[in-house]
């Protein structure tokens, strides 16, 4: 997956558009000033404030949906939350934006499954060939098979239509928080076990010394499991730790665990690193 397109994609994301309202700027300055006066604990809190006001909210979201009313509503809501947006109605337009070397690179993609020219699952698959940008699929209630397929092809999350604007923004923020550079702030170290090395600073994973490409969500899932080897995590606990919200959907966790096994296990059908504990959940076996 590491190629010239990924390099261009990363370079474009390193230079997001500078958009900061007066109110947001005042909040940032106040948070950093208080931190300087109080000390290290306040600084950590200030970093969280700056991340929310400046980092997460300054991100660029690519909206891909052929429903003009829905697309415009999502665009207005995100821009009201200080996000930058790029709105398109076809899969090909979405791929053109992803592959372009001009303009800001999307930090996240909201991708509808039902598009007029290319199926959203196919768009997801093509994006994953060159980019690890987070993808949230937009699905209808009766599209469970497509939803699972989207997750298997590399989508990070999904939102079921109809959805509330508030839920949509919460999901976007949750995904951006866990894939941003601040995600490793509280645990800047290297995790090792069972031949797996996860470097939280460089966001790199190796298996027996060989590099492995993971999506941001797969990496976060691996981190949660490796931080407490041997501990059994229930589905609800993984939803909380990885996706930042509680929504009982076994397919979400199950599919991402399966995808992760395909990347890090010698034999995914007989996993030795990420083991299922029947009726309880999953655990990482370090030895």
Image: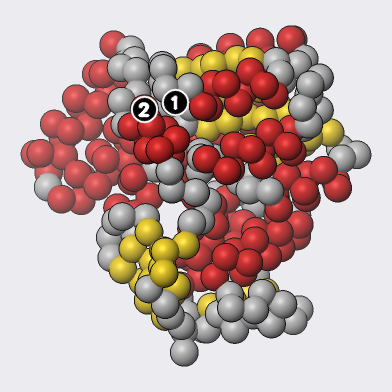
On screen, 185 above or below 49?
Answer: below
Q: How many marks?
A: 2
Looking at the image, residue 12 lies above or below residue 82: below
Q: Position of residue 20 (x, y in %)?
A: 32, 16
As drawn, the residue found furthest toward the front would be 4
Could you tell me which residue is drawn at 27 percent across and 40 percent down? 47
**Residue 220's x, y, as percent?**
49, 57
264, above or below 92, in the image: below
In screen coordinates, is 252 left or right of 77?
Answer: right
**Viewer-closest of 73 and 32:** 73
Residue 5 drawn above or below residue 255: above
Given the current orientation, which residue lies at the most extreme left position? 37
User: Foreground residue, 97 or 186?
Assistant: 97
The x and y percentages for residue 161 are 79, 30
Under tag 1, what secondary structure? loop
Upstream in the sequence, badge 2 or badge 1? 2
Q: Which residue is mark 2?
A: 12
Horizontal relation, residue 48 to residue 152: left or right = left
The residue that mark 1 highlights is 105
Badge 1: few (under 14), some or many (20 or more) residues near its Cα, within 10 Å? Answer: many
Residue 60 seen in the figure: no
Query: Position of 221 compared to 118: left or right?
Result: left
Residue depicted at x 15% and y 50%:
40
Protein image colouring: secondary structure
Q: Is residue 150 visible?
A: yes
The answer to whether mark 2 and mark 1 are in CB contact below 8 A is yes
Q: CA distance from mark 2 to mark 1?
A: 5 Å
Between 287 and 266, the one nearer to me in the picture: 266
* Residue 160: image location, x then y, percent: 77, 36
- Residue 113 lies left or right of residue 110; in this view the side is right
Q: Residue at x 71, y 59 (%)?
A: 255
Q: Which disc is residue 87 wearing? A: none
């Amino acid at each position: 997956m590491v190629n010239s397109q990924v390099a261009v994609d990363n370079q474009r994301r390193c230079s997001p558009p500078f958009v900061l309202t007066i109110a947001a700027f005042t909040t940032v300055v106040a948070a950093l000033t208080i931190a300087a006066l109080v000390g290290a604990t306040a600084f950590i809190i200030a970093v969280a404030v700056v991340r929310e006001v400046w980092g997460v909210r300054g991100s660029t979201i690519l909206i891909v949906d052929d429903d003009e009313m829905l697309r415009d509503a999502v665009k207005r809501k995100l821009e009201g939350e200080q996000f930058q947006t790029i709105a398109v109605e076809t899969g090909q337009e979405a791929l053109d934006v992803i592959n372009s070397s001009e303009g800001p690179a999307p930090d996240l993609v909201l991708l509808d499954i039902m598009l007029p020219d290319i199926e959203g699952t196919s768009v997801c698959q093509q994006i994953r060939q060159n980019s690890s940008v987070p993808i949230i699929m937009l699905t209808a209630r009766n599209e469970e098979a497509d939803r699972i397929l989207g997750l298997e092809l590399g989508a990070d999350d999904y939102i079921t239509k109809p959805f509330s604007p508030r839920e949509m923004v919460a999901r976007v923020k949750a995904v951006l928080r866990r894939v941003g550079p601040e995600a490793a702030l509280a645990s800047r170290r290297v995790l090792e076990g069972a031949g797996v090395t996860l470097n939280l600073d460089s966001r790199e994973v190796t298996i027996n010394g060989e590099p492995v490409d993971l999506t941001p969500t797969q990496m976060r899932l691996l981190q949660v499991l490796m931080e407490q080897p041997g501990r059994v995590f229930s589905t609800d606990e993984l939803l909380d730790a990885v996706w930042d919200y509680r929504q009982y959907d076994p397919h979400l966790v199950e599919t991402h665990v399966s995808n992760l096994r395909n990347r890090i296990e010698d034999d995914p059908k007989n996993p030795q690193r990420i083991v299922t504990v029947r009726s309880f959940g999953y655990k990482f076996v370090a030895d």
